[in-house]
Image (cartoon, rainbow, N blue to C red):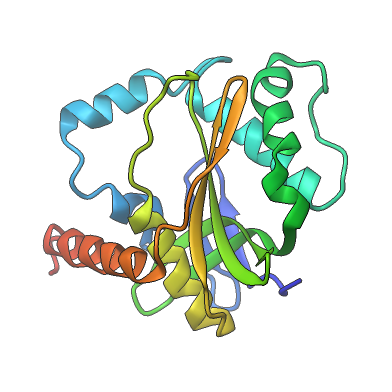
């Protein structure tokens, strides 16, 4: 396992702090990747955020369950809960994890030069390759996939800068009620380029650019 970086995370504010200096990082990977979302798209995302069935509560619970599973710990919520039965059980039973050896779980990452922080869901060895994994939860079994290249590219760069880790593959795990799908390799170069494009365009929108 890789040693965690000295980064504190404020869940409520979704902000990262580099502990050695106390510097609050100006941006998050999520913020940079969403540079081109329209007001209507942002409003639609917020519409389904809150409540016991909202995407935020579901995402927190499912991510916590996967973290506990990979660390061989007990999950923090009842195993008979609806979220466990519909989303978590198929996720943890997926054959992908049988060959997955974790190197970093819920890793806090940063790029101090860009003042950007982020959290990767998992990095590990899988069938002889170093694989970066992002977990996405969706509310319906019929939900469509969307591109996660920018986000994975941001984590890829930060992992390489902080740990010197060379990533072989970037994959997304799609967790839906009743079914989990392990996505194919998205290509490290493709993800790297997507992140660089997002960062360039994001900075153009900032007042000081």
> Looking at the image, which residue is at 72% across and 49% down?
97
State the image quarter where residue 189 is shown: bottom left
State the image quarter where residue 45 is shown: top left
Residue 106, horizontal then vertical, whole percent:
64, 55
Is 2 left, or right, of 146 in this rendering?
right
165 above or below 79? Answer: below
Residue 157, horizontal then vertical, whole percent:
43, 74
19 and 111: which is toward the camera = 111
> Looking at the image, which residue is at 18% across and 26% down?
40
173 and 58: which is toward the camera = 173
> Looking at the image, which residue is at 60% across and 71% down?
19
Q: What is the quadrant of the C terminus in the image? A: bottom left
89 above or below 124? Answer: above
> Looking at the image, which residue is at 18% across and 67% down?
200
Residue 25 appears in view: no
Residue 136, horizontal then vertical, whole percent:
51, 39
State the image quarter where residue 103 is shown: bottom right
95 and 157: which is toward the camera = 95
């Amino acid at each position: 396992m890789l040693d965690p970086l000295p980064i504190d995370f404020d869940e409520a504010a979704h902000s990262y702090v580099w502990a050695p200096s106390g510097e609050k990082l100006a941006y998050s990977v999520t913020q940079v990747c969403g540079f081109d979302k329209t007001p209507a798209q942002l409003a639609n995302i917020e519409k389904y955020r809150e409540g016991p069935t909202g995407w935020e509560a579901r995402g927190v619970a499912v991510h916590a369950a996967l973290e506990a599973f990979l660390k061989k710990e007990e999950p923090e919520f009842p195993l008979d809960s609806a979220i466990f039965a519909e989303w978590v059980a198929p996720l943890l039973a997926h054959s992908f994890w049988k060959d997955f050896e974790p190197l970093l779980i819920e890793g806090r990452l940063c790029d101090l030069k860009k003042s950007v922080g982020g959290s990767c869901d998992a990095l590990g060895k899988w069938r002889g390759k170093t694989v970066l994994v992002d977990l996405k939860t969706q509310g319906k079994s019929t939900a469509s996939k969307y591109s996660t290249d920018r986000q994975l590219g941001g984590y890829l760069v930060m992992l390489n800068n902080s740990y010197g880790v060379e990533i072989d593959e970037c994959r997304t795990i799609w967790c839906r009620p009743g079914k989990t799908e392990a996505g194919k390799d998205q290509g490290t170069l493709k993800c790297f380029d997507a992140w660089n494009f997002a960062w360039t365009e994001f900075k153009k929108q900032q007042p000081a650019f």
